[in-house]
């Protein structure tokens, strides 16, 4: 499609359809897929499993280089391991979700994970869709396509709650999910080091009233347009 493998950055808060959209776009366009939230969750899981006080930034920073985090980038079967252990399930627990904003605000953690992300993107032969909070602003500011997804908090909470009920019996109700989501957004947007933010050159889409399929089609349109504008090899 273009002279070099295309890099697509998709940022936004949780519940906007970011993960489902990113995976589907990557699969349909034959590209790789990277869930950067899973990497922050993985390092958080390791901290909790090793008794590190996640509310002590110095303690977290001191060991940020220890765990080896490996992400598999097949959009049809993405994987995540820590020191060789599959943590795809454990990183979705309420305990990890409750601690991930504190761990991911520590600059040493962000430096470490950002390096990993840049290496994976640079080594993706067919291009890659990278989803997160700071991909367009900080991790891959030169990305070919930058998209920022938003949605009303009510819509986001309803989607998250539906997802959680599907995977975790006894999941929190809608009001609790909404409260936790707003708290996590505030922490992710308010941190000093590379907060959740829209890049100036990102295209924003409000997904509140849209179906997943509509969002996927819109993103594919933006990626294909960008490919057409690039010089051909
Ligand atoms: O996308 P998610 O909800 O799985 O992300 C979990 C947390 O990871 C999120 O609350 C903030 C952090 N995160 C981040 O700081 N930077 C990213 N690029 C992706 C996620």
Image (cartoon, helix red, strand yellow):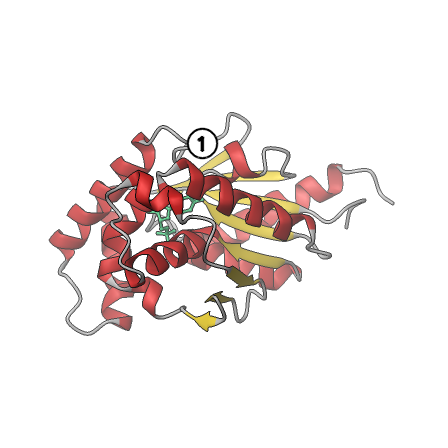
The C terminus is located in which quarter? top right
Residue 133 appears in the rendering: no
Q: Quadrant of residue 9?
A: top right
Number of numbered discs: 1
- Residue at horizontal 73 percent and vertical 49 percent from the top: 5
Q: Which residue lies most toward the right here? A: 233
Q: Position of residue 38 (x, y in %)?
A: 42, 57
Pick whichever, 67 or 143, lies toward us: 67
Mark 1 Cα shell of 10 Å, populated few (<14), some (14-19), many (≥20): many
Q: Position of residue 117 (x, y in %)?
A: 56, 48
Say if 121 sits above or below 134 in the image.
below
**Ligand 1 contact, mark 1 (Cβ < 8 Å):** no
Side (left or right) of 155 relative to 213 = left
Pick whichever, 223 or 114, lies toward us: 114
Indicate the secondary structure of the residue bearing disc 1. Answer: loop
- Residue at horizontal 69 percent and vertical 47 percent from the top: 6
Say if 123 sits above or below 118 in the image.
below
Side (left or right) of 179 relative to 201 = left
Q: Position of residue 130 (x, y in %)?
A: 54, 49
Q: Which residue is mark 1?
A: 198
Side (left or right) of 106 relative to 78 = left
Residue 192 appears in the rendering: yes
Pick whichever, 136 or 160, lies toward us: 136
């Amino acid at each position: 499609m273009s002279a070099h493998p295309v890099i697509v950055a998709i940022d936004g808060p949780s519940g906007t359809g970011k993960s489902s959209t990113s995976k589907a776009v990557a699969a349909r366009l034959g590209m790789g897929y990277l869930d950067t939230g899973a990497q922050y969750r993985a390092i958080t899981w390791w901290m909790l499993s090793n008794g590190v006080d996640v509310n002590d930034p110095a303690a977290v920073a001191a060991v940020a280089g220890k765990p080896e985090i490996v992400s598999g980038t097949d959009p049809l079967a993405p994987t995540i391991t820590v020191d060789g252990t599959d943590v795809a399930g454990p990183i979705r627990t309420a305990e990890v979700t409750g601690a991930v904003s504190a761990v991911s605000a520590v600059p040493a953690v962000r430096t470490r994970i950002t390096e990993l992300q840049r290496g994976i993107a640079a080594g993706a032969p067919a291009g890659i869709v990278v989803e997160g909070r700071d991909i367009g602003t900080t991790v891959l500011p030169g990305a070919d396509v930058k998209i920022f997804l938003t949605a009303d908090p009510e819509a986001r909470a309803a989607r998250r709650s539906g997802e959680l009920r599907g995977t975790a019996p006894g999941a929190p109700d809608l009001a609790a999910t909404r409260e936790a989501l707003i708290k996590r957004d505030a922490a992710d947007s308010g941190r000093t080091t590379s907060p959740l933010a829209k890049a100036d050159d990102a295209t924003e889409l409000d997904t509140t009233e849209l179906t997943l399929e509509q969002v996927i089609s819109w993103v594919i349109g933006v990626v294909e347009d960008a490919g057409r504008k690039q010089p051909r090899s």
